[in-house]
């Protein structure tokens, strides 16, 4: 399922099981008026700057009551085992609280909203108590525990403050709001008593936020797999470039030798001819190389990600990436049929961009208690909005012989077909992404295969 991430980005989060393979194809229909083409946005530039891929032990859609707490009673074992189990716990709590807070903010009915908020508060208190109940005695483990306790306390407090700030307000639920605020104040006081953060850090919003981001990265150690990127076909590209240069140089030398045999003396005409020959070589060498290179790499993956467990260094998964501009006639027939179902006014002249990701899981099994991996593919549409016009224009209305006007913004639409392919089935979905210069306004599922 495709969903919005930040203002101008969206994510896809498939799940992977041991020894599985999965392929995801995205076909973008980008209107020409947006100004996106191979000259303004190259495939390499988009991949390097605006696409991200993560792989972590699955905690997708996990909620607070489902968070595993098997680590908390484990005081024995290796230092690395304790740290990894602790990090898994903290990672799941963070994702669970984010998921539940987002769902709670969607509740419009006041009684239901505050009932849900109090439940989340009680569940969060229980998880924090479990963490603090088993403070390690080993001095080597204290730092890991301190980082986790500090981060979770701060993150949960921030989540509930956001819930109170963005959620509906009512004087009839003053007691519930007070209870939630008291919980946030308690966590703030607790961190101060434990002296987790210095006074200078607490007084600077940037310093405390950046410190918590650092702690977040620390608790992801062993949970989010490390990624190694390799650019495929780099040696092949050098070979093609060298071969084209060799052929062109051979032709140039042949022409030069013929010219020297025709002109027995060095004359102005000979110099002009030789200059023209070398000039033509420089003009056409890059173009010929580009055409031949695109023909050779067409349909071949361009990049490879290798994901390893950051603790054991074991190879967990391999991901291959394709990204290229294409033509409508080269798109699979079923995808073309889905695009053809658009309304006539939406069938604009467009650039077609094809992305594909093929992921193979090498591991036979995962960490105990985890039977799948969560993959996150993040696509940033900021370069798509680079050439868009700013919101402009007025809409005039007449009512009771009075003319009123209001400002309107200019919006653009991307059409996107997503194809999920696994061992047992293939699923097609079409989305309409509406965006302006600053954000994605809406993502709408238009078609989904049953």
Image (cartoon, rainbow, N blue to C red):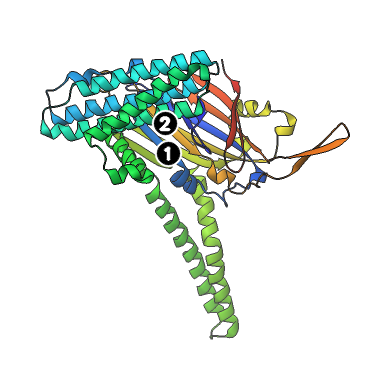
248 on left or right of 235: right
The answer to whether residue 92 is above or below residue 231 is: above
Q: Can the viewer see residue 63 in this picture? A: no
Considering only order in the chain, which callout, 1 or 2, is on the residue closer to the N terminus? Answer: 1
For the point 30% across and 46% down, the residue is 200
For the point 57% across and 80% down, the residue is 270
Depth check: give the residue in front, 282 or 310: 310
Question: Residue 344: x percent and y percent?
Answer: 74, 30
Q: Is mark 2 on a helix, strand or loop?
A: strand
Question: Residue 427: x percent and y percent?
Answer: 52, 21
At label 1, counting other C-alpha atoms closer than 10 Å, the crowd grade (few under 14, some 14-19, many 20 or more) is: few
Question: Residue 278: x percent and y percent?
Answer: 53, 71
Q: Can the viewer see residue 426 in this picture? A: yes
Q: Mark 1 points at which residue?
A: 52
Q: How far apart are marks 2 and 1 (CA)?
A: 8 Å
Q: Mark 2 points at which residue?
A: 376
The answer to whether residue 277 is above or below residue 213 is: below
Do the numbered discs 2 and 1 sit on residues whose CB atoms are within 8 Å?
yes
The answer to whether residue 296 is above or below residue 137 is: below
Q: What element carries label 1?
A: strand
Q: In which quarter of the image is residue 300?
A: top left
């Amino acid at each position: 399922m495709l969903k919005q991430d930040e203002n101008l980005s969206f994510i896809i989060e498939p799940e992977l099981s041991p020894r599985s393979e999965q392929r995801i194809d995205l076909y973008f229909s980008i209107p020409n008026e947006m100004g996106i083409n191979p000259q303004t946005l190259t495939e390499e530039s988009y991949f390097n700057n605006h696409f991200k891929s993560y792989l972590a032990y699955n905690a997708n859609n996990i909620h607070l009551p489902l968070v595993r707490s098997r680590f908390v009673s484990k005081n024995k074992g290796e230092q690395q085992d304790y740290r990894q189990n602790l990090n898994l716990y903290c990672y799941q709590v963070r994702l669970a609280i984010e998921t539940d807070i987002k769902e709670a903010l969607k509740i419009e009915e006041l009684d239901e909203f505050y009932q849900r908020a109090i439940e989340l508060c009680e569940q969060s208190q229980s998880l924090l108590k479990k963490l603090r109940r088993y403070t390690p005695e080993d001095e080597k483990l204290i730092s890991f525990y301190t980082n986790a306790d500090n981060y979770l306390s701060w993150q949960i407090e921030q989540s509930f403050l956001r819930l109170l700030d963005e959620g509906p307000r009512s004087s009839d639920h003053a007691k519930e709001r007070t209870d939630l605020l008291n919980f946030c104040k308690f966590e703030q006081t607790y961190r101060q008593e434990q002296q987790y953060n210095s006074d200078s850090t607490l007084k600077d919003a940037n310093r405390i936020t950046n410190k918590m981001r650092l702690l977040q990265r620390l608790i992801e150690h062993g949970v989010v797999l490390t990624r190694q990127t390799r650019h495929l076909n780099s040696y092949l590209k050098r070979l093609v470039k060298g071969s084209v240069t060799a052929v062109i140089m051979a032709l140039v030398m042949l022409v030069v030798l013929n010219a020297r045999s025709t002109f027995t003396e060095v004359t102005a005409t000979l110099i002009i001819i030789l200059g023209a020959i070398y000039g033509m070589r420089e003009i056409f060498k890059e173009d010929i190389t580009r055409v031949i290179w695109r023909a050779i790499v067409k349909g071949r993956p361009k990049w490879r990600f290798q994901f390893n467990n950051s603790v054991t260094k074991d190879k967990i998964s391999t991901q291959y990436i394709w990204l290229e501009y294409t033509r409508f006639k080269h798109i699979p027939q079923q995808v073309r049929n889905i695009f053809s179902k658009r309304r006539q006014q939406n069938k604009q002249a467009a650039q077609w961009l094809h992305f594909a990701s093929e992921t193979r899981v090498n591991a036979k099994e995962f960490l105990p208690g985890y039977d799948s991996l969560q993959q996150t593919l993040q696509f940033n549409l900021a370069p798509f909005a680079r050439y868009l016009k700013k919101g402009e224009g007025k809409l005039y209305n007449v009512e009771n012989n009075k003319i009123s006007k209001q400002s309107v913004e200019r919006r653009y639409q991307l059409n996107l077909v997503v194809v999920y392919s696994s061992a047992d089935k293939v699923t097609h979905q079409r989305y309409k992404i509406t965006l302006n210069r600053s954000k994605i306004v809406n993502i709408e599922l238009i078609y989904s295969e049953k």
